[in-house]
Amino acid sequence: MPPESAPQIDALEILGERLCLDFINTVDPHVGSRQHDYLASFADLVAWSVRAGLLTDEEASAATRIATQEPDRVEALFQHAILLRETLYRIFTALVERRAPDSEDLAALHGAYAGVVGRARLVAAPDGVVWRWPATSDALEQMLAPIIRSAVELLTSPEAERIKVCPGLGDCGWLFLDASKSGRRRWCSMGSCGSRAKMRRYYARTHAGT
C-alpha cells in the first residue's frame, strides 16, 4: 500500500453511523465544485477498508499483493466500488428527499446483494450467527460485501426514515443516520459543520444593523 494513501484516509471522519453511509461519505464535500474524492486509487480503497474495520492489516497486505499480480482484476474491482458508492448515494438521497429511488439503481444493488448472499454462508459464532466466506475466497471478494449488506439492511429497515443529509453551509451533503433520541440531529458533526453554522449565526446577530 503506498504510504501516501493512509494519511489522507486517516483524516477522513467516520460520522455516518452506518458502514454504507460512511462509504458514501468518502467524497468530501458531496456537493459543490470543490469535491475531494478520498478513494482516488485502489490503495485508498484498501486503506479505507482497514480504517472502517473491513480488512485486517494482514488482509490489506494480501490485497496489495494481489494488486501487483492481477492488476486487471483489481482495477475492475476498484471501478465497481466507485460505481457502487455513487449508486448508493443516489438511492439514499432519493429516500431523504422522499422520492422513489431509480429502478435501475435498485436493480444494481439487488444484483450485488444476490452475489454476496450466493457466495457467503451463515454460520454459528460465539457472539451469534454471522456471515462467513469460503476458505477459497480472498480479501478482494470480501472487501465490498459488508458495505452491500449494510446498505440493504438499512434500506429495508424503519431506520431508513432517519437518514439525513448534512446541509453544512451549502457545502457538505454528507449522509448520516440520526440515531439521537430526539431525532433532531441536523449536522454530520457539531465540531465541523455545526460549529461553522453556529459561528455564522453569531456573526449575523452581532453585526445586525451595522
Image (cartoon, grey):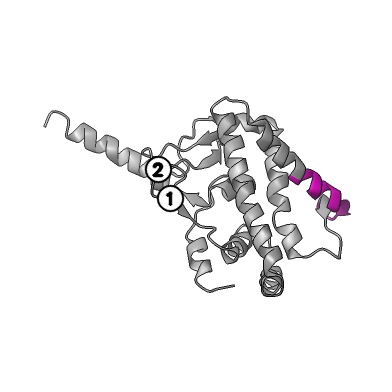
**Is residue 63 visible in this depiction of the protein?**
yes
Give residue 113's position: percent from left, percent from top: 76, 44
In the picture, the disc for residue 48 is none
Amino acid under label 2? Gly
Measured along the vertical axis of the image, is residue 35 above or below residue 163?
Answer: below
Secondary element type, mark 1: loop
> Does the magenta portion include 113?
yes
User: Which residues fall within the magenta stretch?
Assistant: 112-127
Tell me the number on the disc at residue 32. Answer: 2
Q: Secondary structure at mark 2?
A: loop
- Indicate whether 46 appears above or below 127: below
Instruction: Please identify the quarter of the rendering in which residue 77 is found.
Output: bottom right
Local crowd size for mark 1, using a 10 Å CA cut-off: few (<14), some (14–19), many (≥20): few
Residue 40 placement (x, y as % from top left): 53, 60
* Vertical placement of residue 191 versus 6, above or below: above
Viewport quadrant of the N terminus: bottom right
Percent position of residue 34, x then y: 39, 49
CA–CA distance in space, label 2 to label 1: 7 Å
What residue is shown at x 58% (from left), y 37% (from top)?
90
Identity, as a three-letter code, of the amino acid under mark 1: Gln
- Where the C terminus falls, by quadrant? top left
Residue at the image position 72 percent from the left and 37 percent from the top: 107
Residue 99 in picture, x, y percent from top left: 58, 25
The number of callouts visible is 2
| Residue 165 shown in magenta | no
Q: Which residue is mark 1?
A: 35
The residue nearer to you, when weighing 117 against 207, is 117
18 left or right, relative to 169 = right
Residue drawn 55% across the image and 73% down it: 2
User: Can residue 18 be seen in the rendering of this structure?
Assistant: no
Q: Residue furthest left?
A: 210
